[in-house]
Image (cartoon, rainbow, N blue to C red):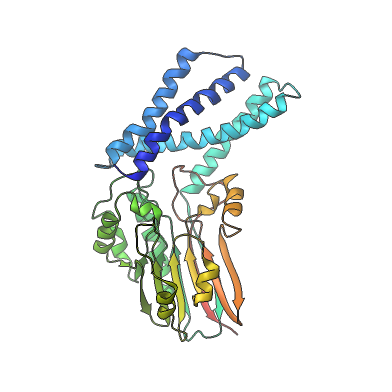
Amino acid sequence: MSFRTRRILKTTPLFMIMEYIVLRYLLSLFSVTNDIMLIPMVLILGAMQCVPMLFEEKKSTRTGRFVSTLFGIWEWVFVMLLIYLAVIFIVEYFIRIPPAVLSLILLTIPAIGAYAYINAHRIVVKERTLVFDNLKKEYNIIHVSDVHFGSIRHEKIIRDITSKIQELTDNSDIVVISGDLADGSCVIEEDDFMEFKKVNIPIIFTSGNHDYYPGLENVHKACKKAGMIILENQGTTYGNLNIYGLSFSFDDIEMPTTEQLKAFIDKDKINIVNYHVPTGWDALSEIGFDIQLSGHTHGGQFYPAVWLGNFFYGGYNRGLFKRRINDSKHYLHVTTGVGIMDFPMRWGTNSEIVVLRLRKTQ
């Protein structure tokens, strides 16, 4: 049983209690109290959260994925209800809100939800330009992160990403995936990423935290079969690009020392570190990395988590950031990711693939 599965099984009873309290308060606003109906509903929701996950760990099925998706939508609705009802509770302390007005307010949740669901499943291609003084050749890097291949987004997301990348390969040099290729909500089989084999430029992958949940060795096997280049605390060169894959660590992986990272730096090349989380940019820039490619945050994925993401990651929640150290330019690029985690919704962010255009200073 994976870490993710154990975590969800432990938290499900608490989540069910919260569901009961929130739904009971919601019904009370309309003068309805019916525990005979409410308790079975909460039990069904708890089963929807746990049962498919136990089977998906062994073999992913359409039924398991469908139920997981339904529950993911409900999770988002529940989070929105929690926020809305907290505000309503405070307002009702001062003034009584008529049921008709309450209904109109609550109807905005499915309206936003419909948009957020459609938006999450639409891949947007963006371009950003990075300028360097010592660039010998122009490059276009396709930056991808947080695919989260799992029970909610399965083979279709791999097909969609591959199709988008193929549209870009004529004018691109390399693809870099900054972790969380797998979600951990279902087993990873050797053929799961074979669609990537259709891409005719190199694909580099370095793990993120979710890649460990279904077993990192399973993710690596699928990557290798798809012809991808795996960089786990090791590097490679591609023309004038010196690329190092810095693994995500749960403290059980030996990480490179500062001296080892400095030894990798080639001052005649553009030094890139592929690191799942957008942390450590100060130290990695000082070591000599010109570009840090990260993901992990999803940009917050939807409001109000977008604002929380900015707080938790020191403003490095999404986008391109630049600094100068001794007259040299250093960049951090944090993509919002192309997939979703837990909730099949995006509101205030995009499912994005970003083309990073490396250009010489004019």
**Quadrant in which the N terminus appears:** top left
Q: Identify the residue shown where x is 48% and y is 26%.
A: 17
Residue 32 higher or lower than 56, as above or below:
above
The one of 355 and 53 positioned closer to us in this rendering: 53
How many marks overall? 0
Residue 303 visible in this rendered orientation of the protein: no
Please state if 141 lies on the left or on the right of 67 as rendered.
Answer: right
Please state if 92 lies on the left or on the right of 20 as rendered.
Answer: right
Residue 33 higher or lower than 357, as above or below:
above
Residue 356 location, x and y as percent? 50, 70
Residue 242 location, x and y as percent? 41, 78
Q: Identify the residue shown where x is 48% and y is 86%.
A: 136
The one of 332 and 4 positioned closer to us in this rendering: 4
The part of the image, by quadrant, that contains residue 320 is bottom right
Residue 318 visible in this rendered orientation of the protein: yes
Residue 51 location, x and y as percent? 32, 32
The one of 102 and 206 positioned closer to us in this rendering: 206
Residue 16 location, x and y as percent? 45, 27
Residue most extreme to the right:
94
The part of the image, by quadrant, that contains residue 249 is bottom left
**Quadrant in which the C terminus appears:** bottom right
Please state if 151 lies on the left or on the right of 217 as rendered.
Answer: right
